[in-house]
Structure formats: structure tokens, C-alpha cells
């Protein structure tokens, strides 16, 4: 039974070590007033993956390593 636990733990560790995602995060503010903007849509261009800013104007996206273009829209 101990061998099964050890094998399971080692498999989980190896899986998590290969899926090393990073984060893109930031804060969106009005250029004139410096006020945080709530509900700004942040989208990875060419995908359906995205998020929106919170009450503090902050956002965070988990992404695989690479280069991305962010599309930002606010109504």
C-alpha cells in the first residue's frame, strides 16, 4: 500500500512540474483621472480566453509560456 501512495505522489509531482504556467496580471486605470476601471474586458487576441477587471481595476490570467496580444475593451 505504501508503494501505491509513493507512486501516486511521484506521478502527481511529475505532472505538476511539467505544467508550468505563468500569469499575466495588471491594473487598468483611467489615463486622465487615475481612477481604477471596473469591468474592463481583457481577452487574449485570437482566443476565447480572457477575464475582466475587479473592483480595484486588477486582473490576472493564467497562461502557458509564450507571447500573447491582449485585447482590452471598456464600455
Image (cartoon, rainbow, N blue to C red):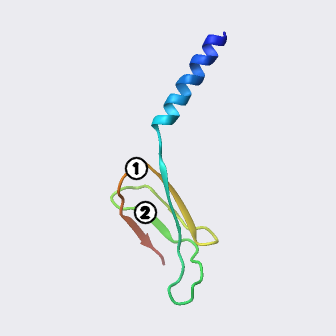
Closer to the observer: label 1 or label 2?
Answer: 1
Q: Residue at x 58, y 74 (%)?
A: 38
Helix, strand or loop under label 2? strand
Q: Quadrant of the N terminus?
A: top right
Residue 14 sits above or below residue 52 on the image: above
Q: Quadrant of residue 73?
A: bottom left
The label on residue 3 is none
Farthest residue to the bottom: give it: 32
Q: Position of residue 53 (x, y in %)?
A: 56, 68
The answer to whether the residue labelled 1 contacts the one labelled 2, judged by CB atoms less than 8 Å apart, is no
Please determine whether, in this image, residue 7 is positioned above or below residue 71: above
| Position in image of residue 23 (x %, y %) | 50, 55
Relative to 25, residue 15 above or below: above
Name the residue nearer the viewer: 40 or 18. Answer: 18
Give the secondary structure at mark 1.
Answer: loop
Q: In front here: 75 or 70? A: 70
Please state the horizontal and vertical placement of residue 14, each as a whole percent of the image. 50, 29
Residue name at image x 33 percent, y 58 percent? 46
Q: Residues within 10 Å of mark 2 (few under 14, many from 20)?
A: some
Q: Within 10 angstroms of label 1, few (less than 14), some, or many (20 or more) residues?
A: few
Measure the C-alpha gap from mark 1 to mark 2.
16 Å
Q: Is residue 2 left or right of residue 58?
A: right
**Quick check: 32 above or below 65?**
below
- Name the residue that disc number 2 marks: 43
Residue displayed at 46% across by 66% down? 42
Q: What residue is pinned by disc 1? A: 65
- Name the residue at 36% across, 59% down: 68
In x, y percent, where is residue 64?
Answer: 42, 48
- Count of labels shown? 2
In the rendered image, the residue lying farthest to the left is: 46
Instruction: Name the N-terminal-most of marks 1 and 2.
Output: 2
Amino acid at each position: 500500500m505504501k508503494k501505491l501512495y509513493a507512486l501516486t505522489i511521484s506521478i502527481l509531482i511529475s505532472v505538476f512540474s511539467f505544467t508550468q504556467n505563468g500569469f499575466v496580471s495588471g491594473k487598468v486605470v483611467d489615463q486622465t483621472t487615475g481612477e481604477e476601471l471596473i469591468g474592463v474586458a481583457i481577452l487574449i487576441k485570437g482566443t476565447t480566453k480572457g477575464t475582466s477587471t475587479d473592483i480595484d481595476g486588477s486582473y490576472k490570467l493564467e497562461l502557458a509560456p509564450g507571447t500573447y496580444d491582449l485585447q482590452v475593451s471598456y464600455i
